[in-house]
Amino acid sequence: MKDLKLTVRINKPIAEVFEFTTNPNNTAKWIDSVEGERADTFPPKIGTKYENWDSSGKVNQYVVTKYEPSKVFQLDATHQEYKVRYIYTLISESETELEYYEWSESGQLHAPFMQEILDKLKEVMESPALKEN
């Protein structure tokens, strides 16, 4: 098994971080490799299906397997043994720690997240321009 764990602190309330990171309309704003994403229901729940694609048209499909608002959000890939879990921790009323954990039950992680992706999430969420969107 191969795994990776990263964390970032974001100066936003936990509910706002949770909503932003689970909303498929926001994924391409902070993950450069994702061109677009959609979900079959929003807000999500256990069983919600997500689909994202990159600029080459490669499609990845996931299903929500853990969902506790402002606590945990987990996606399992539908065609490989890959999982990703977001854990949200309240630091203060205006600060949240997000832990990103991804793992593969067998084999290697093909395109593991890098800290720069979570740093971009922080930058996007803390930007004054976010309030305008």
Image (tube, helix red, strand yellow):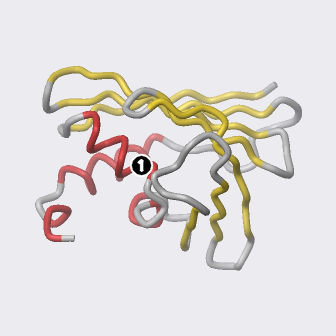
Number of marks present in the image shown: 1
Q: Residue at x 63, y 37 (%)?
A: 84
Q: Residue at x 14, y 32 (%)?
A: 94
Q: Quadrant of residue 29?
A: bottom left
Looking at the image, residue 5 lies above or below residue 62: above
Q: Quickly name the residue at label 1.
A: 21
Q: Amino acid at mark 1?
A: Thr
Q: Within 10 Å of the Cα at label 1, are there few (<14), some (14-19), or many (20+) other Cα atoms?
A: some
Outermost residue to the bottom: 56
16 on left or right of 108? left
38 on left or right of 121? right
Mark 1, secondary structure of its residue: helix
Q: Quadrant of residue 55?
A: bottom right
x and y percent of residue 86 in the render? 50, 34
Looking at the image, residue 13 lies above or below residue 55: above
x and y percent of residue 133 in the render? 22, 70
| Foreground of the two, 133 or 56 | 133
x and y percent of residue 28 in the render? 46, 66
Q: Which quadrant would the N terminus be assigned to in this image?
A: top right
Q: Residue at x 64, y 43 (%)?
A: 64
| Foreground of the two, 60 or 110 | 60
x and y percent of residue 131 in the render? 14, 62
59 on left or right of 126? right
Q: Residue at x 28, y 32 (%)?
A: 9
| Foreground of the two, 102 or 14 | 14
